[in-house]
Amino acid sequence: MKWYKVLGLVYMEGTFIKKVKVGGKSICLVNFETKLYAVSAKCPHAGADLSEGLCVRKLIVCPYHRYTYNLETGKGGEGQNDFIETYPVEVREDGVYVGVASIWDKLRGFK
């Protein structure tokens, strides 16, 4: 897994959703209840930009059809049968970092 520093982001407290580009991927950084999460920015159901949605009860809500995804697991809401990619996040002294696994990492069982 490779760790990428999120450029141009000043970590702030309070709930927010911000779309960033990390390791060639569009990712939503979500700060909810003092914890930072990183998930795919694209809804698998309709292709909507999840950064334009909202966050409630540790779920990111798609702005198009109100599909929900768990911020920790990426699992879609009941009956959706889909998921979004989740990424590990670290807040370090010099900034926020997101871990992105390569296809080889995934094949070997690393997330």
Image (cartoon, grey):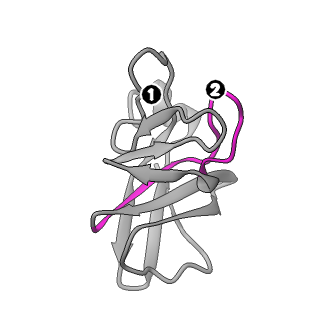
Q: Which mark is residue 45?
A: 2
Instruction: Find residue 98 and report its horizontal and vertical position in percent.
Output: 47, 60
Q: Amino acid at mark 2?
A: His
Q: Residues within 10 Å of mark 2 (few under 14, many from 20)?
A: some
On screen, residue 80 above or below 76:
above
Instruction: Find residue 69 and report its horizontal and vertical position in percent.
Output: 44, 36
**Is 43 contained in the magenta span?**
yes
Specify start and end residues of the magenta stretch as a single range. Answer: 34-50
Determine whether, in the image, residue 65 is placed left or right of residue 83. right
Q: Which residue is mark 1?
A: 76
Helix, strand or loop at disc 2? Answer: loop
Labelled pair 1, 2 in contact (Cβ < 8 Å): yes
Q: Amino acid at mark 1?
A: Gly
On screen, residue 36 above or below 7:
above
The quadrant in which residue 47 appears is: top right
Closer to us: 38 or 56: 56
What's the distance in space between the residues labelled 1 and 2, CA to CA? 10 Å
